[in-house]
Amino acid sequence: MAGLVNNLLILLLIFQSSCLGFKNPLSVFKRYKDTTRSLSSECLGNNRPVTSLGLTDFVLDIRMPGVTPKQSDTYLCMSLRLPVDEEAYVVDFRPQASMDTVHHMLLFGCNVPSSTENYWDCDEGICTDKSNILYAWARNAPPTRLPKGVGFKVGGETGSKYFVLQVHYGDVSAFRDKHKDCSGVTLHLTHQRQPLIAGMYLMMSVNTVIPPGEKVVDADIACHYQKYPMHLFAYRVHTHRLGKVVSGYRVRNGQWTLIGRQSPQLPQAFYPVEHPVDINFGDTLAARCVFTGEGRTTETHIGGTASDEMCNFYIMYYMEAKHAVSYMTCTQNINPDMFRNIPQEANIPIPVKSDMIMMTHEHHHEETKKTGDSSSLKQPKREEEEVLDQDFHIEEAVDWPGVNLKLGQVSGLALDPKNNLVIFHRGDHVWDRNSFDSSFVYQQRGLGPIEQNTILVIDPSNAEVLDSTGKNLFYLPHGLSIDKDGNYWVTDVALHQVFKLGVHDKEPLLILGRSLQPGSDKNHFCQPTDVAVDPVTGNIYVSDGYCNSRIAVFSPNGMFIMQWGEETSVGKAKPGQFRIPHSLTLVPEFGQLCVADRENGRIQCFRSETGQFTREIKHKLFGTELFAVSYVPGGLLFAVNGMPYPGDIEPVQGFMLNFSTGEIMDTFIPVRKSFEMPHDIVASEDKTVYIGDAHAKTVWKFTSTEKMEHRSVKKAGIEVQEIKAETVIEAKLKNKPISTESSKKWEKHHMVEQASPGISFVLITTLLIIPIVVLLAIAVFIRWRKTRVYGADADHKLDSSSGRILGRLQGKGSGGLNLGNFFASHKSYSWKGFDRLSTEGSDQEKDEDDGTDSEEEYSAPPPPPVSSSS
């Protein structure tokens, strides 16, 4: 009998081993526990990024891998993959940094970091796909804790797979001893589904100018809210040295309700919203930053260096899971007049103790003088002006019939005041190597003008031709623009002219340039490419062109005003230099004109009134050519590149960018047909995008598709339903913003980090119990058999043998298997509510282990009932 029991014990162990052999949630941490990070020995803290807190919770330590920045205002980034594939929720953030070395930190979530290196210069980008801000820290801010039941969703099918940490090292004098820095943030994550999903709403000013010596300068931001209700529970303010006070409000029916107000010179933590504030559809979110220009001798602009300024108001909120949006941004001021009624408190600076003043960054003005004004021309590094709200993806409208229109070479696109699509094409004319001589004089005049209507007005919904014009007027159409009055403005590269056409006029209303005469003075063009008309001043901007390298500006009646630009010199293209300025788009909100500098593969932006260079947007994904650009009010920029040169790997595709930061938010390609030479792009405010292709002789329509998820979950008696669009997942697979070669490199680099999906807690428990049940069943069977064979003596014999085995599995004093003793060995993670955060900048904090459940804590207000909407 003893041998039989021993066999049963061996059988039990085999069953348990086989059950534990399945990859459970704890197994994904093994690669981190077995291998430590290669951090510098000078770095303190945990060098293992993942620590298990039981079957459902774990801690993730995200740190810089021992870096030594060499110059002030260095931005360094590093990435860490989420160690699990299934959904997880971030419920706690703990900063691991000091203001003595770090100016600020930002934590992003995304799926494809911009680099596979241990760390990289953030100028290379943060992520190649969309990125969401999850956390921000500065000025020795204390930890941020979320209310119970609230978490930032990561992982799974729709959540971020990677965390990217960005650290801004402002004044690097602290690194004179060449020590290494491992600043970062520690996250507490859980697999337990949170009933409320957290998100971040960022309000920021992008065009504030602070005059020198000005005592008070206000930067105002306001946007309409047009989504499902959100409930605010924390806020954070951010400026640089000139900021005095930042305030945020909800405006409803003319009533201003304070969200939060704080001095940006105090620890820039997330402070709890003192009184519950909910935001509903139709409300307005408003914020004001108060600056002073005293002490400055030059204008101060919004930018990423410590000598620039920023005006940011962060809001942490939660939403019901079925409506959750992870990130939203407001960069506009939709109603400047409303700020006449802003509460007076928003204009009163908050006193700050002298020892709390933000650290000063001394910049080397002598170096700036030696290198000219390059600092004013340099694209600001990415700090907190991150991507706009992107809960959508751009994909082709595959049912739109416009792709089958019979067209010539499509050269220009525009939208009229009724939002109809207008196409400018070349009919039966073709631009080829025989079209011009070496002096750029058109050689095919014998063909006569194009006999077909070259301008078509298309219904955007069904591609029906609503109107057409432009017959017998043009030889080689190129650029198209439409002014606020609906007039067509076009360029013809063969005629070297610019035309203004009324919708129903047979003759041009205005002609600029001399017919068939190339030139470079104020009366001549040389193959002009595009035209744009300022909706306020009526000034006319002409990109000129293929054989000139300039932007020419004319008054509304055609009088020459000014020009800027020059040919690209040998070597790296400088600001204001062009190699075919190919496409124009006005950015009226910021008073700028942006140019697609085609052969330099970049976008250049200038102040439209003066021609002063403001910024360059250039990405490796653009490749060697960038053909066209189109701005959408609200901060979105759309662009399309050209076919790669031999040896290049960047594919031809469309881009959606954040105008404020220049970051790529999305890329897209057509499903039907393929890009051959996409020549122009135009987008509407509803994020409908059209791309015309000169070689494919077609136009594609792309639309934004919201990213949604579908699940039905019952938890705590509440049914949470989420909707999922499978087409979005398919679109994501078809529109990855990285090349095949890059994706293979990425896959190889992170192969060791791939985590197998874990098995749920319930399944693990079930698998552990099965062998016990089998063992008990066998024991009962043996007892029954022995009873039949040995009679009453069987009780004693069975109890003395099997009791020794089962007794080891039973808890003391228990009458059965006590799994609680096993799970109790894993220490649970205790955390409190959203404690009020210190405003004194102390690094000390209460030991959480000393707290009890009876302690007073801040808890987020429960969400009010959501009214149903159709």
Image (cartoon, rainbow, N blue to C red):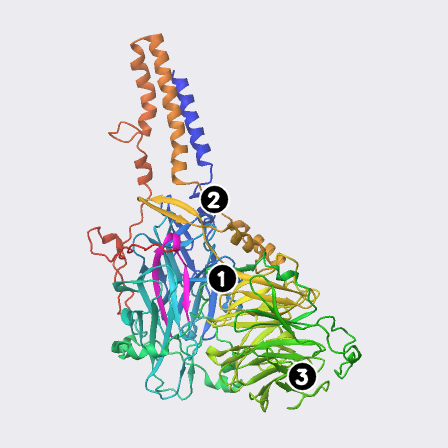
Q: Which residue is mark 2?
A: 757
Closer-to-camera residue (21/521)? 521
Quarter placement of the C terminus: bottom left
Check disc 2 and give the amino acid type. Pro
Q: Answer with left or right where residue 257 lies relative to residue 398.
A: left
Instruction: Say whether residue 606 is magenta.
Output: no
Q: Is residue 315 magenta?
A: yes
Numbered marks: total: 3
Segment tinted magenta in the rendering:
311-330
Which residue is under mark 1? 130
- Residue closest to the eye, 433 or 689: 689
**Residue at (61% x, 59% y) in the render:** 401
Label 1, label 3: how far apart the Cα atoms are: 41 Å
Q: Amino acid at mark 3?
A: Gln
Q: Secondary structure under badge 2?
A: loop
Nearest the viewer among 469 and 517 is 469
Q: Earlier in the sequence, mark 3 or mark 2?
A: 3
Q: Look at the numbered disc 3 and give the secondary structure of its residue.
A: strand
